[in-house]
Each structure stands twice: as structure tokens, then as C-alpha cells.
Image (cartoon, helix red, strand yellow):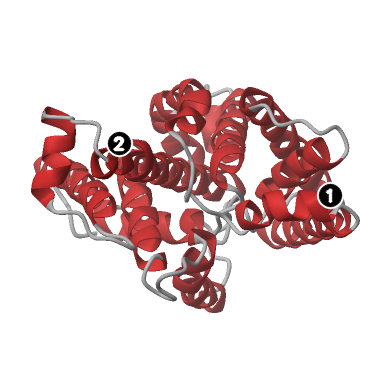
Amino acid sequence: MLFKTTRVKIIGLFGSMTLCLFFIMISIIYGYTDTPWQMVIDSFLRFDGSNEHLIIQNTRVPRALIAAAVGASLGIAGVLMQALTNNPLADPKIFGINAGASFFIVVAVTVFSITSLSTFVWIAFAGAAFSAAIVYMIGSFGQEGLTPMKFTLAGAAIWALFSSLTQGLLVVNERALEEVLFWLAGSVQGRSIDYLYSVLPYLMIAWLSSLLISRHMNLLAIGEDVAKGLGQKTGLIKLAAACIIVLLAGASVAIAGPIGFIGIVVPHIVRAFVGIDYRWVIPYSAMFGAILLIFADVCARYIIMPQEVPVGVMTAIIGTPFFIYIARRGLVKR
């Protein structure tokens, strides 16, 4: 743990917020055509309706803000999932939650021809909740109950199932394939600010709720029996955490597709800085998740310039080595 005192942790948190704002500016400035800093500032202070200012306001800014919101949400979701499952490999994508949300959205597009953003949000929530419930039930089978290994295997199985069903639907509907293929890879490109507005109320509720239960997560991390002995209603805390995860994962999938590995990488990095106190781990994970996804999105613009790689591919490139490293360490209890 690098940040050992409360004062240092507070300074570090404000520093990470500043760094996040800096990366948002980097995302606005750099791309297929680099934009001068002064032009970005002028687009806010002296907007003149030029093409350059319109691109900044309607394309670059929404993209940066969406990446920050999704990254923060996935970082928090990863923290809560790892806390609930005692599994350092827990992540909304690895455990099939993103795949369930994606499958429900693809069904809505291909079968029911739904295109409403507000409807997508609720469909994604339903898919995420349905997938999470199935994974939990499958992982709980057997005399030993829910274990990290069984939970991981159940998540991988559900992820494979929903991914296969999604691909099958798209194969028989070429038109829908063209519409959602880039989205399925995970991308924040081409999203208007309306995408963010449609899910922001739910994200804000989830962000605030995660902070409110952080103290209870510390108690739960000591051990469920100990927590019950101290008077905690562990079932209620687990249910609240699960609902927050569904909100965060469902909203993220609705606007950016199934982006993975942010929820795995970020919590481990954060714990190296602030330890295992969830009152600090959760807000730090939000900042680090936002920074990591923005960084990945900026890098995705330069890999095959002038084309762009979906940011979900970049997070996989960044996260896969880390995933292998954590897996080799073993499923140690957190």
C-alpha cells in the first residue's frame, strides 16, 4: 500500500480526479485530426458554429465523457463483484453479465426492431440481471455452495452461451449485423451525448449507492459470519451490491457495448495504492477506471490510422496479460 495516511489518500484522490480531467482533454484534442488546445477552449468560450467547433462539441466531448462514465462504472462494478464473490478475476464481462445484456439488446433489435435509447437501457438492465441470477444459481449448486472457482466457471459458461446465441441471431439477420457489429466489440465512437443522458440518472444512483455501502463492504470482507455477529444484514448488503452491479453493467453495455477487463485490472491497481478499505477503493476505482478507458480509447485511434480499433479490443490487449498474471497467482480470497 503506497498511500498509508488519510491525508495522502485524500491528496491522491484529488490528484486522480485532476489526471482524469487531463485525459478527458487529451481525448478531445487527439484523434484522426489533432485539435489545438486553444481551439478547444474557444469552442466552449467563443463558440462560432464552425465545423471544427461542431466536431469538438458534438463528437469529441461526448466521446470523452462517455468513456469516463463507462470506465468509472466498470471499475466500481469490478470492485463490488470481487468483494461479493471473493474472486480476484470477477468482472462483468468475464462473469457473463455483459453478454446477457448484449444478448437482450440484440434480440430487441433483430426480433422486435427496437431502436429507442431509453428502451435499450431497460433491456440491458433486464439482460444483466437475468444473466447474474443464472450465474449465481449455477454457481451455488452442490454441497459446498458458492465458491470462487464454481462462480468463475458458471460465468464463463453463461458468457459463452449468450455470446453464441448473439452471434447466431446476427448471422441470420445481416442488416442487424451491420448495425451492431462495431457496438458488440465495445466502442464509444460515434456516440452522441444523448446516449450518456439516457443512462446518467441510473449511473449516478449506482455511484452514490456504492459509496454508501462501502463501509458495509468492509465489514462483509472480514467474513460473513463475523459480519452477521456484528449485526449486519448481509443478505440485504449483498442484494444492494448486486443491484448496483446490474445498474452499472447494464448502463455501460447500453451505451458502449460489452467492454471487458476494466473491472479486473482497476481494483488490483487501486489496492496497491490504498489497501483494502472500500471507502477508498471504490472512489479510486472510479477514477482509475475512467482514466484507463479513456487512455485505451485514445490508443485505439492510432493503431491502424486512419481507421479505428474498437476500444473493447484495446482493453482486451491491455487486460489479458494482467488476467493471466492474476490467474497464475491463484484465486486467493480478497
Q: Which mark is residue 138?
A: 1
* Residue behind mark 2: 57
Q: Nearer the viewer, residue 234 or 272?
A: 272
- Image location (x, y in percent) of residue 135: 77, 47
- Say if residue 140 shows up in the picture: yes
Residue farthest to the right, as pictured = 172
- In the image, taking residue 185 as reference, residue 297 lies left or right, namely left
- In the image, taking residue 158 as reference, residue 62 lies left or right, namely left
Q: Nearer the viewer, residue 11 or 128?
A: 128
- Quarter-wise, where is residue 30 in the image? bottom left
Amino acid at circle 1: Ile
Identify the residue at image location x=19%, y=59%.
2
- Image location (x, y in percent) of residue 49: 25, 31
Within 10 angstroms of label 2, few (less than 14), some, or many (20 or more) residues?
A: many
- Pick the quarter of the image with the N terminus: bottom left
Figure check: 303 above or below 263:
below
Within 10 angstroms of label 1, few (less than 14), some, or many (20 or more) residues?
A: some
Q: Which mark is residue 157?
A: none
- In the image, taking residue 331 as reference, residue 319 lies left or right, namely left
- Image location (x, y in percent) of residue 18: 16, 44
Under circle 1, the secondary element is: helix
- Image location (x, y in percent) of residue 206: 48, 27
Q: Earlier in the sequence, mark 1 or mark 2?
A: 2
Identify the residue at image location x=71%, y=46%.
102
Amino acid at circle 2: Gln
Q: How far is disc 1 from disc 2 in space, using C-alphas?
A: 46 Å
Q: Nearer the viewer, residue 98 or 278?
A: 98
Figure check: 140 above or below 315:
above
Under circle 2, the secondary element is: helix
Identify the residue at image location x=62%, y=36%.
250
Identify the residue at image location x=52%, y=53%.
187
